[in-house]
Image: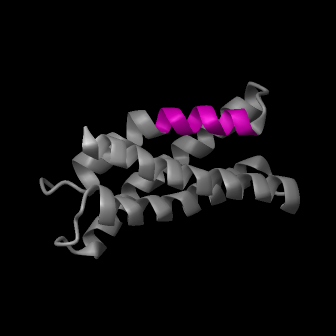
Amino acid sequence: MITFLKANTSSLLASATDFLLTVLLVQFAGCKVVLAAAAGTLAGGVINFLVNRHWVFRQEEERAARQMGKYALVWMGNLALNTGGVYVLANMAGLHYVLSKVLTSLLVAFLYNYPMQKNFVFSNNW
């Protein structure tokens, strides 16, 4: 349970980075919503990997390059799910882009990111 709580704390920090960058790019740089969402997801992913590696799953003994490779695979799925979800909810369903980002992020975090990071990226079984 502690690992799950720490992982969610890491996810909140990464999400804050993701959302802040997304909103800044849309509101002040005039970026398209999907491009801004992708950039935010990238920045949040970097933060999430670093915090998870050093604090949540404490995997210093395993080589960082291997974990980065596994994380990159999971992150590509994360990027596709987040970007696709925001596209569907904002452009097709007509929801505000921030609400689209929140709903998509929550679904992806609980149903995809945590299980994949726990059981694949930071697992010694792979």
Residue 106 counted in the magenta span: yes
x, y percentage for residue 21?
A: 69, 58
Left or right: residue 66 versus residue 96 is left
Q: Is residue 8 magenta?
A: no
Occupied quadrant, residue 5? top left
User: Is 64 above or below relative to 123?
Assistant: below
**Chief secondary structure of the magenta portion:** helix
**Image location (x, y in percent) of residue 6:** 35, 48
* Magenta residues (range): 98-108
The residue at the point 35 percent across, 58 percent down is: 52
Residue 106 appears in the figure: yes
Q: Residue at x 31, y 41 (%)?
A: 4
Q: Residue at x 76, y 48 (%)?
A: 33
Q: Which residue lies furthest to the top in this view?
A: 93
Picture coordinates of residue 104, whole percent (x, y): 58, 35
Tell me where residue 71 sits by quadrant: bottom left
Question: In the picture, which quadrant includes the N terminus?
Answer: top left
Picture coordinates of residue 55, whole percent (x, y): 32, 61
